[in-house]
């Protein structure tokens, strides 16, 4: 049907729909009732859309008048106003609060297992009169490599291993800044700030530009220990290792020392411990050999002592550098270091 009669019928129908919609909108007492009105009037199957579909049967000259009379904007505005009124008037709590009921249980956080182990080691060495020292995470080529007796062409200086700061690649020494790739550079800072003899530990996070796997991460924790005195017997190094492992596991742990080369120590050693995940039988964590490297160690190289302002003919010492994350893996039987840096609350909740 088309013509004047069809137009009048649609106009009357629109007036009825709009009048009823406005009444129902103002009468809605809850957001649920308002949503029902919204669906019935302006929804995909709403009354106004049904009328709109009928416009196509009208003559061209009549369509504009019906389109204006749809009044969808007026209805939408009324919906928005009533929605805000309901939001302002509804109580903040869906149900009344009974203050006589016990309070809900609040979730309790805990220390990250690596931080907990760091504190345990700090306490153990504090009892032995060791000072806890902290160095900066942004360091330089001077402290991390030059003072540590690294040759100019050593591969660790390359960006394959070290994160160099932007704008510093064309500089050298103190002007070439980086994220510290190890903690050992902090030893020279300490030597320059304190008179010998001294004994101190310095824990912290270090950064390496390397691939991640079950045993390696780009950002991980180390724990370094250094004794410097006029006469430091080699057995002091073994004592440091035993102190660390006894603190971690609460019992003696089998260890072995292998000759190793590190520019900052002479002589140097690789210190291994029996894998505590498989108790020496072989597993993914220890690569099926039953042992896992946990720390290098050795006597400070004479060039390192000189960089710290000490006379190597008078002073000597012993370094131990612990891979703290690996000790945490041994302590709790964790077979993938990436879990500790994943921020997965299912994993971290076990240590709360």
Image (cartoon, rainbow, N blue to C red):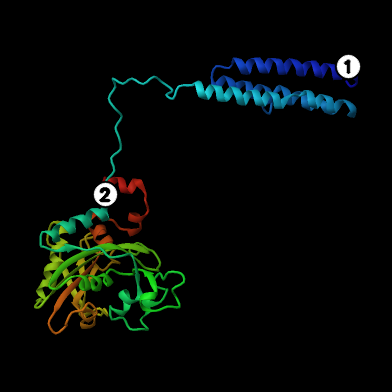
Q: Are marks 1 and 2 in contact (CB under 8 Å)?
A: no
Which residue: 20% across, 83% down?
A: 302
Q: Secondary structure at mark 2?
A: loop
- Identify which residue is drawn at 44% across, 75% down: 169
Where residue 171 appears, as percent x and y from the top left, is 42, 78
- Residue, x 51% and y 24% (percent of image)? 88
Q: Is residue 39 shown above or below 296?
A: above
- For the point 31% across and 48% down, which residue is it? 348
Residue denoted by label 1? 5
Above or below, 82 relative to 272: above
**Mark 1 residue element:** helix
> N-terminal of the two: label 1 or label 2?
1
Task: Identify the image quadrant of residue 40.
Answer: top right
Closest to the observer: 100 or 113? 100
Q: Nearer the viewer, residue 123 or 1?
A: 123
Within 10 angstroms of label 2, few (less than 14), some, or many (20 or more) residues?
Answer: few
Label 1 vs label 2: CA separation?
A: 79 Å
Q: Is residue 284 visible?
A: no
Compared with 111, 4 (above or below) is: above
Is residue 83 at all visible to an observer of this figure?
yes
Mark 1 neighbour density, 10 Å: few (under 14) some (14–19) many (20 or more): few
Relative side of 243 to 217, left or right: left
Residue 258: image location, x then y, percent = 20, 76
Residue for badge 2 = 111
């Amino acid at each position: 049907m088309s013509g004047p009669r069809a137009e009048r019928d649609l106009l009357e129908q629109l007036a009825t729909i709009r009048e009823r919609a406005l009444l129902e909108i103002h009468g809605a007492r809850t957001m649920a009732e308002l949503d029902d009105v919204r669906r019935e009037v302006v929804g995909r199957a709403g009354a106004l859309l049904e009328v709109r579909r009928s416009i196509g049967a009208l003559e061209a000259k009549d369509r504009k008048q019906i389109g204006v009379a749809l009044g969808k904007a007026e209805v939408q505005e009324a919906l928005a106003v009533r929605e805000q009124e309901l939001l302002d008037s509804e109580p903040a709590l869906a149900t009344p609060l009974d203050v006589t009921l016990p309070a809900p249980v609040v979730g309790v956080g805990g220390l990250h297992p690596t931080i907990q182990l760091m504190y345990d080691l700090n306490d153990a060495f504090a009892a032995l009169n060791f000072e806890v020292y902290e160095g900066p995470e942004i360091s330089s080529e001077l402290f991390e490599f030059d003072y540590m007796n690294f040759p100019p062409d050593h591969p660790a200086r390359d960006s394959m291993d070290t994160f160099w700061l932007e704008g510093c690649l064309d500089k050298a020494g103190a002007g070439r800044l980086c994220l510290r790739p190890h903690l050992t550079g902090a030893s020279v800072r300490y030597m320059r700030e304190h008179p010998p003899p001294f004994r101190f530990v310095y824990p912290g996070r270090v950064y390496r530009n390397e691939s991640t796997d079950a045993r390696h991460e780009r950002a991980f924790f180390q724990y370094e220990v250094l004794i410097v005195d006029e006469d430091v017997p080699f057995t002091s190094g073994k004592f440091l290792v035993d102190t660390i492992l006894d603190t971690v596991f609460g019992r003696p742990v089998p260890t072995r020392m292998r000759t190793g080369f590190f520019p900052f120590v002479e002589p140097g050693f690789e210190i291994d411990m029996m894998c505590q995940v498989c108790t020496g039988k072989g597993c993914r964590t220890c690569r099926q050999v039953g042992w896992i490297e946990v720390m290098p160690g050795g006597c400070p190289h004479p060039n390192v002592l000189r960089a710290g302002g000490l006379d190597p003919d008078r002073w000597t010492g012993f370094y131990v550098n612990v891979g703290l994350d690996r000790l945490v893996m041994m302590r709790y039987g964790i077979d993938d270091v990436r879990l500790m840096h994943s921020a997965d609350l299912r994993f971290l909740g076990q240590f709360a």
